[in-house]
Amino acid sequence: MPSDRRLEREVAKRRHQRRGQAIALASSVIVLGGLAALVFTSPGWPTVRETFFSWPVFKQSFPHVLDAFWIDVKVFLVVEAAVLVLGLVVALVRIARSPAIFPLRLLATVYVDLFRGVPTILLVFLIGFGVPALELTGTPSDTVVLGGIALALSYSAYVAEVYRAGINSVHRGQRDAALAVGLTESQAMRHVLLPQAVRRVAPPLLNDFVALQKDVALISILGPLEAFREAQIIEAQTFNFTPLIAAALLYLAVTVPLARVVDRLGGPEGTVR
Amino acid sequence: MSAATPVLEVRGVTKAFGEREVLRGVNLTVREHEAVALIGASGSGKSTLLRCIDLLAEIDDGDVFLDGEVITDPSINPVGIRRRLGLVFQAYNLFPHMTALENVVLGERWAHGASRAEAEERGRALLARFGLEGREDDRPDNLSGGQQQRVAIARAFAGRPRALLLDEVTSALDPELVGEVLAAVRDLKAEGMTMLIATHEMSFAREVADQVAFLHEGRIIEQGSPSQVLESPQREETQRFLKRLLEAGRA
């Protein structure tokens, strides 16, 4: 049987909550309504609506853009897997202290500095047009593959640093304890440091993958008919930008759910286990 | 007792961190089945000495012998030596992503090459021995400090060490949890485990230790039986240290 004081407290709490909800609703209506009014009453709005939000053009172009979008999804999935592995390898090489791998460590450091420091679009250009120009036998000539390689090289450099920060953030006592029970340095890394580091860096890693998913559009400059490129072609034929909106919606359909996963991992009660 | 063979011998060990000399020529012997209590003020180098013996820190000069064999030569692979010693940390340092059982079993499996079934059976028995039956699948953050430290003791003991090094194993604990950890150490002593115990618990040192060594400004300046060192210390520095502990209510 709850006491009177407790019931009173609950009533007051509910009243307070309802008031909060009312304020949130009112402020949302005012801000969003104001923005909508600003856009919809602007002098150019009828033209914009026709060229960006034309329903007939959308209906006609969406299936084509969707078809092309599967290339983006495939590139994203393959590149993401490659980045997870390559980034980890680079991070481990940079952390290892063995003198035998000094040249590798130097190479890894130079790699991260270079590929993190150059705009991704530039890398796509350089690799997409530069590698075939070498005319070496065995080098890929498929533009999707070349674009994917450029993206993987660029993102692995970022992801290597994320891993490295994660490994370095594990308390030094963990390494001591692992060595004290008789593990070698590499066993300590595999069983003790890495599992803790990966849990810790899952949110920033996913964040990088949201960015990667969008940057797949950069391979369009090499020519393959992925979503952005397909949308541009239809746009050029119809003189209407609506296909680009269709492509944008498709990117969002992937990145927004990913972003929610990031939130859940990084949120206050969403600590990763 | 003193006729027993030395297990650990520390001879003239020095260690400096930059300009700061922490150990300035430490000499110390721990004989088979003997428990030596290492006492001294905070920052006197007790932890550093234990870390140097377990080769987690490199000494500058001198030697450490394990069963008569030099272990501090830079050309020796430290992994093999560490497998013959056990170290328990002040802050437990359990692996937070593993269960209690996995913590105890890790070294057994990967350092000592035991099969999974073998290691787990022994791990369960060890946890039960230290009063942790039923807590095998708990992660460290679901255990009290005293339970965590007992898991850590089981983990260090799992590798069948020649000697156990205990670094202030009760000083991170709430007072009411100290007793259960000391009981675990007492249990190991009764079994004849050779131990070097850095501690602030004078009553415990008196009870469990065969020898007490007082580390002051990087040297062992007084050593003897607990009654000699703790009841009638010869050196003025020892007297002052014990008096301060008494005033703080720790002796």
Image (tube, coloured by chain):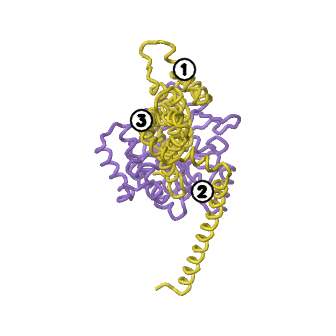
Q: Chain B: what color?
A: purple
Q: Which residue is mark 3?
A: A74
Question: What residue type is disc 2 on?
Answer: Glu
Q: Which residue is mark 2?
A: B231
* Distance between mark 1 and mark 2 Cα atoms: 60 Å
Chain letter of the residue beneath label 3 in the structure image: A
Question: What residue type is disc 3 on?
Answer: Lys
Would residue B81 be visible to someone looking at this image?
no
Disc with the residue nearer the chain's start (3 vs 1):
3
Tell me the residue at 58%/29% (across/down).
A121
Tell me the residue at 52%/32% (across/down).
A156
Above or below A135: residue B143: below
- The label shown at residue A103 is 1
Above or below A185: residue A201: below
* Distance between mark 3 and mark 2 Cα atoms: 77 Å
Chain letter of the residue beneath label 1 in the structure image: A
In this picture, residue B13 sits left or right of residue A59: right
Q: Quadrant of residue A34?
A: bottom right
Would residue A70 be visible to someone looking at this image?
yes
Rate crowding at label 2 as few (under 14), some (14 to 19) or many (20 or more) other CA atoms within 10 Å: few
In this picture, residue A109 sits left or right of residue B128: right
Question: What residue type is disc 1 on?
Answer: Pro
> Secondary structure under badge 3?
helix
